[in-house]
Amino acid sequence: DQQVKQNSPSLSVQEGRISILNCDYTNSMFDYFLWYKKYPAEGPTFLISISSIKDKNEDGRFTVFLNKSAKHLSLHIVPSQPGDSAVYFCAASQPFSGGGADGLTFGKGTHLIIQP
Amino acid sequence: EPEVTQTPSHQVTQMGQEVILRCVPISNHLYFYWYRQILGQKVEFLVSFYNNEISEKSEIFDDQFSVERPDGSNFTLKIRSTKLEDSAMYFCASSDISTGELFFGEGSRLTVL
């Protein structure tokens, strides 16, 4: 049961253009969403997050948009740079239950390739 | 910058052997996690740990798996009797608040022969 879906296994974008990575989720209990970036042989690195009370969060070249009614979020990278080439994971979590720490549910990832 | 460190970076073991993967989370973090990624597949949640006990665990985390925080700094994942399908990259992570940003280690690659 894939609660977080990234339907594009790979995406190729020209340097300087906008990269748009998409993510859909099915669990309406998710209220916090994160994007992680992963280079080969390294652990995922946190990139940007958004709470369900917002519909947009921006950090430099990275912007995350959340459409709760569509259960969809996207990551925009503008302008795309060669160093952005990596696998991007969308992740989601449910509200803190008070009894402990819930894990993140990850999508399968999208391999972003920035072409010169 | 503080970071999560994991050892070993790569371990090769025979099926049926016990394996212990070690992690040193960021020192002021309170929540600890193990994830794994089988080659070509997504990152999967295994277990979370808070206040010296397991908070949540996934279906993957069966009786063959256990976690421990033996000395206040290390966080270990033990697999009692490894199976071929346990071959994966295992990531440790920590955070200072639940549902917040998780900081991941670089991973320990486990190869079961």
Image: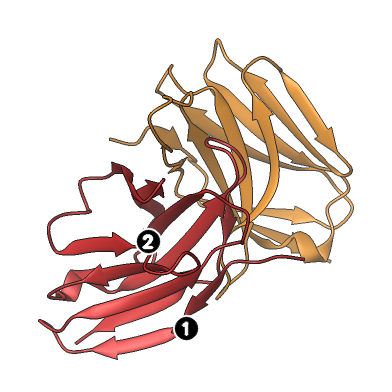
The amino acid beneath tag 1 is Ser
Chain letter, orange: A
Q: Which residue is mark 2?
A: B36
Pick the residue in front: A11 or B71: B71
Q: Earlier in the sequence, mark 2 or mark 1?
A: 1
Q: Is residue B39 depicted above or below A90 in this figure?
A: below
Task: Indicate the position of residue B2 as horizontal and vertical percent values.
Answer: 71, 65
User: At numbered mark 2, what does the secondary structure look like: helix, strand or loop?
Assistant: strand
Indicate the quadrant containing the N terminus of chain B: top left, top right, bottom left or bottom right: bottom right
Question: Residue at 40% of width from left, 57% of height from top?
Answer: B35
Q: Marks 2 and 1, how far apart in space?
A: 14 Å
Residue B108 placement (x, y as % from top left): 43, 76
Q: Colour of chain B?
A: red
Q: Looking at the picture, does residue A75 appear above or below residue B6?
A: above
Nearer to the camera, B3 or A110 = B3
Give me the chain letter of mark 2: B
Q: Which residue corresponds to the image point at 46% horizontal and 53% vertical from the top-left?
A: B32
Decide which of A116, B68 is in the foreground and name it. B68
| Residue A115 appears in the rendering | no
Residue A32 is situated, as x and y percent measured from the top left of the image, at: 57, 28
| Element at label 1 | loop
Residue shown at 55% from the left, 10% from the top = A69
- Position of A95 with respect to A55 (left or right) is left
> As drawn, which residue projects farthest toward the top?
A69
Please state which of residues A6 and A97 is positioned toward the viewer in this rendering: A97
Give me the chain letter of mark 1.
B
State the residue at coordinates (66%, 51%).
A46
At label 2, which amino acid type do we have?
A: Arg
In which quadrant will I find the C terminus of chain B?
bottom left
- Give the residue pinned by disc 1: B9
